[in-house]
Image (cartoon, rainbow, N blue to C red):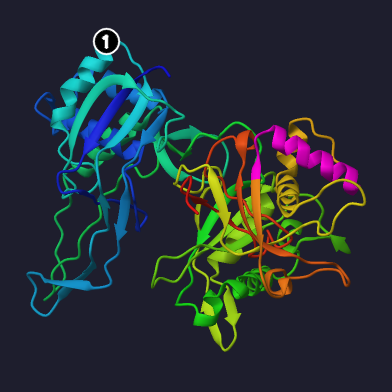
Amino acid sequence: MSEALLIRVAFPRGAYSGGELGAPEELPSPARLHAAFVAAAAGGPYATVEGRVLEAQKAHRGAVRWLEEHEPLGIIPPGTRSVAYRARRYRLRAAVNHANETDFEPLCALDGPITYGWPAPGRAVLESLQELAPEVTHVGRADSTAIVTVSLGDMDAEAPGVLVRLPGRGPGRPLRIATAGRFDALATAHRRALRAGRHVSGPQSKQAADQPVESAGEEATELRRFARAPIAGSWPFAEAWQVKFSARLPRWALRLDRRVAVAVAVHRAIVAAIGTDVPAFVSGRDGDGPLRGPGHLAIHLLPGAAGETPGLVLGLPAGVPEADRATLLDALDSRPTVGLGRRELHLEPPAIGPAMPFWSAEGTDLATVVPMVLDTAGTPRRGLWSLDDAVLCSVGYALRGVLEDQGVAWGRGWGFRQGLVTELRDRDVQARGRRVAGSASQFVHRAPPGDLMVAVDARVTLGDLAPAPGGLLALGRARHLGGGLLVPVEDGAP
């Protein structure tokens, strides 16, 4: 943790209104905040008159340019909720019988201020930005009034809720930042907009159309990804994509014994939407054989509140190539059709986030929503082996990549499994299992003929195997297709 320049933006209306290329923004980007400071410096009471325009004084111009010469460290966002208007509005203009049809401006409700962090500047820059901050009247559209304050403070990149600037693609928010030359680009565009226009005749019997003003566009800006700082340590999944259905699920699909079937139907819809050249991590196949290792796409129905249709979570394994990730994203953007009995539902485009953490609850105890089918059923010829041991063994299989990164050599047979259970108990991993009555086949998609299948409700504590609480994880044979999803439960709850 180090000292940083903190720019705090509060919206008295409790909402932010802004958009880029016709798409509403949830949060103002650092580039938009930079533009607000440019307007305050070059259009506020401290500016001086130069011909037909106002010019920022030297100290203020230097301070705003400092923001574009140093990339922001991160953002502390509030809770947000976008508001979409289905209605259109019509405003009468000066000309008769020519209504002005427009959309409502996009709006995003916020439950608090937004804090932007930059590296700590020199004293002169800090004082100039503090002088300009009260002159920032709005960020985004003109009705998006704002109160801006500038101070020095600490920004902990690992604190919950902090979005840090990260390289490459992945989960998070893509936001524009101002780069060197942005101040000059905005000032030049402003000068062009204020040039005297031509005197020409207007259209007959009709009000003249609005003339758009030439802007600086995206000149001297770049996209950056802001997301939670990655947590040290490996985990089976790198990203969690939350997907909603276009309509309510049929009642039968909400039963626990049909969750695997729903996940299989979603998987088939995704494969059909991709068409040819389905990535191996999606198909689960490596050539003619099954894909080995942890690199599978996982599909699970999330627990839903009473009366609400649960959504989906897709767990993307670590190390998926960018081209394969883009293929899956394009397929979901096409809203694939899922056949569930006689009904057809569409999948909505995903909301992308990290898989570690995924759950907001901080409890250390995890329990299965849908019963898990044990990876290894039966008992060894020698030694004791309980149902709890079998659940612990499944925990080890689900976290194989984590264990191998920590030096555990993988093997086969009952001797290895018994040693794996001992290793996990030494690492303070705990598990309890309760056998589920009835056929276990309803909780697994496919199994070799003659295999013994045992379904259990499990409760586990991962100990030091989890680098942080709240990671997306499932256990058992159907952990990639609807079975064994672990959710946090309160410590001590039955």
**487 is higher (above) or lower (below) than 94:** above
Query: Which of the pair 385/243 is nearer the observer?
Result: 385
> What predominant SS class does the magenta segment belong to?
helix
**242 is higher (above) or lower (below) than 275:** above
Residue lying furthest bottom in this view?
Answer: 342
Query: Which of the pair 94/169 is nearer the observer?
Result: 169
Query: Which of the pair 319/169 is nearer the observer?
Result: 319
The residue located at (31%, 55%) in the rendering is: 81
User: Does residue 36 appear to the left or right of 301 in the view shown?
Assistant: left
Judge whether residue 419 is colored magenta: yes
- Name the image quarter holding the N terminus: top left
The residue located at (41%, 23%) in the rendering is: 70
Check disc 1 and report the residue beneath it.
123
The answer to whether residue 179 is seen in the rendering is no
Query: Which of the pair 191/35 is nearer the observer?
Result: 35
Q: Position of residue 331 (x, y in %)?
A: 60, 65
The answer to whether residue 241 is seen in the rendering is yes
Q: Position of residue 45 (x, y in %)?
A: 9, 27
Q: Position of residue 149 (x, y in %)?
A: 20, 28
**Residues in magenta?**
411-430
For label 1, the crowd category at 10 Å Cα-Cα, with few meaning under 14, some 14 to 19 and many 20 or more, is few
Q: Position of residue 198 (x, y in %)?
A: 17, 52
Residue lying furthest top in this view?
Answer: 123
**121 is higher (above) or lower (below) than 239:** above
Judge whether residue 321 is colored magenta: no
The answer to which quarter of the image holds residue 273 is: bottom right
Disc 1, SS: helix
Q: What's the amino acid at mark 1?
A: Arg
